[in-house]
Image (cartoon, rainbow, N blue to C red):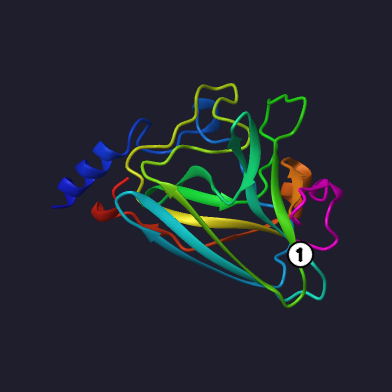
Amino acid sequence: MGSVIAALLAALSGCGGSDVPGFENGGEPPDPSSPAAAPKVDFSADIEADSTSVSVTYTVTNNESSEIFVADRTLVPSGAGTKLSTAPYVTAENSDDGPVLVLSHRVFPWPPGVNLAVAPTGGGEMLAPGKTLTVETSVDLPATRNQPFGDDLGHGKITLPENLMAVRFCLGVIASPIPSALRSEDAGDGTLTFAHGNAGHDAQHLFCSASEALTSDSAY
């Protein structure tokens, strides 16, 4: 039975390798741990996966005495332009049990060797002390990789691997003082845009859920 399920997962997973290769072999760029201490927040994420999609509902409560910044928006195409959305970033990582699909709202560091005139942007909002924020996000399966610096960073096109075994969600949260790079512009609805890069990445703490298995009923 196990071999049948594995074959089904592989058949439905689309193009890519059986695990996540190193960056110079066409894999995900380095994502070092941030030096930022974890803010005092309560974070939880509920993940539901079926044969067609993965849905995440997450909640964050600010227990700090000052505002925190929650990076809960991504920039997506909209007509001839772009707009901020709750659609997640979609990447992958290796685990002891196999490759994991990673959905996230966060700041990404600048990949090595990549030269862009303008940094890609995302969005987020300030959360006052004692306040709770709940966000829903989802992705259709089979998923398409979505990372703000793009799919080709000089070592070939980066694709999601075959045979993804699980999914998890990560959220970037930044405690005060908020770096100026994360308060670059008010989008008009209280949402702030920010520039992806090392300054924002090093200021954020990444809260991640436990991994949820992708079974034959939620085959990728």
Q: Is residue 33 above or below residue 60?
A: above
In the figure, is residue 159 to the left or right of 107? left
The percent coordinates of residue 92 (x first, y second) are 47, 43
Q: Quadrant of residue 16?
A: top left
In the figure, is residue 107 to the left or right of 192? left
The percent coordinates of residue 59 (x first, y second) are 58, 68
Q: Is residue 189 above or below residue 82?
A: below
The percent coordinates of residue 137 (x first, y second) are 51, 55
Q: Quadrant of residue 68?
A: bottom right
Q: Is residue 210 magenta?
A: no
Picture residue at 72% right of the left edge, 24% below the top: 115
Tell which residue pokes out farthest to the left in this image.
1
For label 1, the SS is strand
**How many discs mark residues in the rendered view?**
1
Q: Which residues are magenta?
A: 174-190
Look at the image and tell me in which quarter the C terminus lies.
top left
Picture residue at 47% right of the left edge, 56% below the top: 168
Q: Which residue is mark 1?
A: 68
In the figure, is residue 55 to the left or right of 39? left
The percent coordinates of residue 70 (x first, y second) are 69, 59
Closest to the observer: 104 or 140? 140
In the figure, is residue 161 to the left or right of 172? left
| Mark 1: amino acid | Ile
Picture residue at 54% right of the left edge, 65% below the top: 58
Q: Is residue 187 magenta?
A: yes
Picture residue at 76% right of the left edge, 54% below the top: 203
Tell which residue pokes out farthest to the front in this image.
79
For mark 1, does the 10 Å Cα neighbourhood hold few (<14), some (14 to 19), or many (20 or more) residues?
many
Closest to the observer: 174 or 57? 57
